[in-house]
Structure formats: structure tokens, C-alpha cells
């Protein structure tokens, strides 16, 4: 698979997605898009607001889970639905700006409780990055 994208995966009891992108920052953005798509059943969103984001992680896998956890937290507590982001990765840190639709709680159609480490996979290959993430529903 080339470029970047995501697709749902079959998983017992939980939701899982596969992600791919040419670089890690793009993979994180694709993960946010996949999560928001699951939360909204694919509703069309408009990224009219920006928010800063900054987090520290233990390693790239932990950074993916923490990033998606932040996206989920903002969606469920503030209705801020991430549509895009400009991210800078340095060591184990992540800094950048998220773009999204604010106050969109009414657009949420599904509930996801958490981003998990269960069956988490993150690999780098000649075509870029791939990941598998499971969400607890």
C-alpha cells in the first residue's frame, strides 16, 4: 500500500485499525483521522479551529497511544474532533498544532473508551510506517 490511509480490521469485542503513511508524523495524523471517523461514523467535518499539542512518550509505540488518547480525550470531553495536524517529532516528544471542528459533541455516534496497547504494532519499512491499534469499546 502506498501513500497514507487507514482501514478497520476484524477484531473480537473491540475495534482495531490498520494505519500506513510515509513517515511517523503522517501516521499519527492518519491515526487521528481513523479514530474520529470511528467516533462519528464518517461524518464530514470542517477543521475550523486550532489547538496546540505537546506530549512526551517512552518510545514511538507509546507516542502513538498517547497521541490517540489525547485525540479521544478532546473528542469525548470537549467535542473537539481532530481533522488534521502539523506535528514535529523529536526523540520521544511530540509538539505541534491540531486542526479540528470544535464543539461537535452532537456529531459523536460511537463510544470508544480507550486506546489500548493490546496487539499494538508499529513498524518502519521501505515503504514507510505501518501500525495496528486496538480501541476498547
Image (cartoon, rainbow, N blue to C red):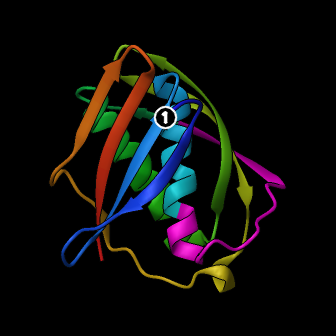
In the rendered image, the vertical position of residue 102 relative to residue 7, given as above or below:
below
Residue 130, image x, y percentages: 37, 34
Residue 4, quarter of the rendered image: top right
Q: Is 128 positioned to the left or the right of 56 in the image?
A: right
**Picture residue at 58% right of the left edge, 77% below the top:** 41
At x 16% / y 51%, what residue is drawn? 119
Residue at left offset 52%, top offset 23%: 22
- Residue range highlighted in magenta: 36-53
Identify the residue shown where x is 45% and y is 52%: 70
Residue found farthest to the left: 118
| Farthest front residue in view | 1
**Category of crowding for the residue at label 1, using alpha-carbon neighbours closer than 10 angstroms: few (below 14), some (14–19), many (at least 20):** few
Please state the horizontal and vertical placement of residue 12, each as a whole percent of the image. Answer: 18, 74
Q: Which residue is mark 1?
A: 1
| The one of 7 and 85 positioned closer to us in this rendering | 7
Q: Position of residue 6 (x, y in %)?
A: 50, 50
Q: On the rendered image, what quadrant is the C terminus found in?
A: bottom left
Q: How many marks?
A: 1
Q: Is residue 52 magenta?
A: yes
Q: Quadrant of residue 44?
A: bottom right
Residue 18: give x, y in percent of width and height.
Answer: 38, 49
Secondary structure state at the residue bearing disc 1: loop
Q: Examine the structure image and report whether residue 134 is included in the region drawn in magenta.
A: no
**Is 11 situated above or below 53?**
below
Amino acid at each position: 500500500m502506498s501513500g497514507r490511509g487507514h482501514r478497520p480490521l476484524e477484531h473480537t469485542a473491540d475495534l482495531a485499525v490498520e494505519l500506513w503513511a510515509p513517515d511517523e508524523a503522517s501516521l499519527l495524523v492518519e491515526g487521528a483521522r481513523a479514530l474520529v471517523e470511528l467516533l462519528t461514523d464518517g461524518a464530514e467535518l470542517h477543521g475550523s479551529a486550532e489547538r496546540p499539542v505537546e506530549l512526551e512518550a517512552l518510545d514511538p509505540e507509546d507516542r502513538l497511544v498517547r497521541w490517540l488518547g489525547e485525540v479521544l480525550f478532546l473528542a469525548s470531553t470537549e467535542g473537539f474532533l481532530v481533522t488534521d495536524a502539523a506535528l514535529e517529532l523529536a526523540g520521544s516528544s511530540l509538539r505541534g498544532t491540531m486542526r479540528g471542528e470544535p464543539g461537535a459533541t452532537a456529531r459523536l455516534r460511537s463510544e470508544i473508551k480507550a486506546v489500548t496497547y493490546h496487539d499494538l504494532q508499529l513498524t518502519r519499512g521501505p515503504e514507510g510506517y505501518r501500525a495496528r491499534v486496538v480501541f476498547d469499546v
